[in-house]
């Protein structure tokens, strides 16, 4: 399993699945993930309930979960779509452990998150871009020059490469020149270059006036 897949699995689990599970269910799910997907990359695991009861949650207290209780947790996990239960042989029951992203409640939540992100997107939709330009009164937020429909751009104050989003708060009206300088940098990195450019532009302007 790739490092990124593991990262995604854990992030999804903590952010989206954990709130939907009881502590017992969460522990058992993690126990199954640990002994299937994390062990050998396979979502399938064949294991007896007694082994499970002994293995999982056998922490410092060493308390053993009883068989009936284990049966109940397993069926709750199945009901929530976290696992599916296969056949039982002498070696135990086969479980298919689902990735958080394949579990219904997580799918629903992800859809909601994506919808919210779309609503917060002031970068992609031209009508919403205009909201930012108007908020900033069509003035480049870095050099103070006026911009027009033809040369106005939107800058991500926190760059996208550093996790900056398309939100109102993170977008600034920007002229093409400053945008070219700032692109991909955080403000503190870009500031000296922007200042230098403003000075150069001023010099050029003054030079023209003198002629
Ligand atoms: Zn500018």
Image (cartoon, rainbow, N blue to C red):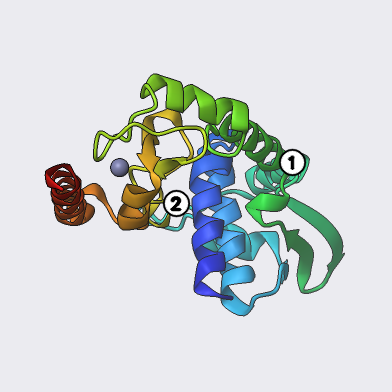
Residue at x-position 19% and y-position 47%: 208
Q: Is residue 76 left or right of residue 121?
A: right
**Marks 1/2: CA distance?**
32 Å
Nearest the viewer among 94 and 104 is 104
SS type, badge 2:
loop
Place residue 81 in its image quadrant: top right
Residue at x-position 72% and y-position 40%: 80
Q: Is residue 209 left or right of residue 12?
A: left
SS type, badge 1:
helix
What mark, if any, has residue 161 been given in the picture?
none
- Whole-percent x, y for residue 172 in the image: 37, 35
What mark, if any, has residue 63 been given in the picture?
2
- Whole-percent x, y for residue 131 in the image: 50, 22
What mark, if any, has residue 104 been given in the picture?
1
**145 above or below 200?**
above
Q: Quadrant of ligand 1?
A: top left
């Amino acid at each position: 399993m790739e490092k990124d897949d593991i990262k995604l699995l854990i992030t999804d689990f903590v952010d989206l699945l954990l709130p939907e599970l009881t502590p017992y269910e969460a522990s058992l799910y993690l126990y199954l993930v640990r002994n299937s997907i994390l062990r050998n990359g396979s979502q399938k695991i064949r294991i007896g309930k007694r082994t499970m009861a002994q293995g999982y949650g056998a922490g410092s207290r060493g308390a053993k979960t009883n068989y009936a209780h284990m049966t109940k947790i397993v069926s709750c996990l199945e009901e929530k779509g976290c696992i599916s239960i296969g056949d039982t042989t002498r070696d135990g029951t086969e479980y298919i452990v689902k990735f958080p992203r394949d579990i219904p409640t997580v799918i629903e939540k992800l859809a909601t998150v994506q919808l919210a992100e779309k609503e917060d997107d002031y970068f992609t939709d031209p009508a919403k871009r205009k909201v930012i330009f108007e908020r900033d009164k069509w003035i480049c937020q870095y050099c103070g020059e006026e911009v027009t429909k033809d040369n106005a751009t939107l800058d991500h104050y926190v760059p996208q490469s550093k996790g900056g989003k398309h939100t109102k708060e993170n977008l600034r009206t920007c002229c093409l020149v400053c945008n070219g300088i700032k692109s991909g940098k955080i403000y503190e990195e870009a500031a000296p270059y922007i200042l230098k450019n403003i000075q150069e532009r001023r010099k050029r302007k003054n030079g023209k006036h003198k002629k």
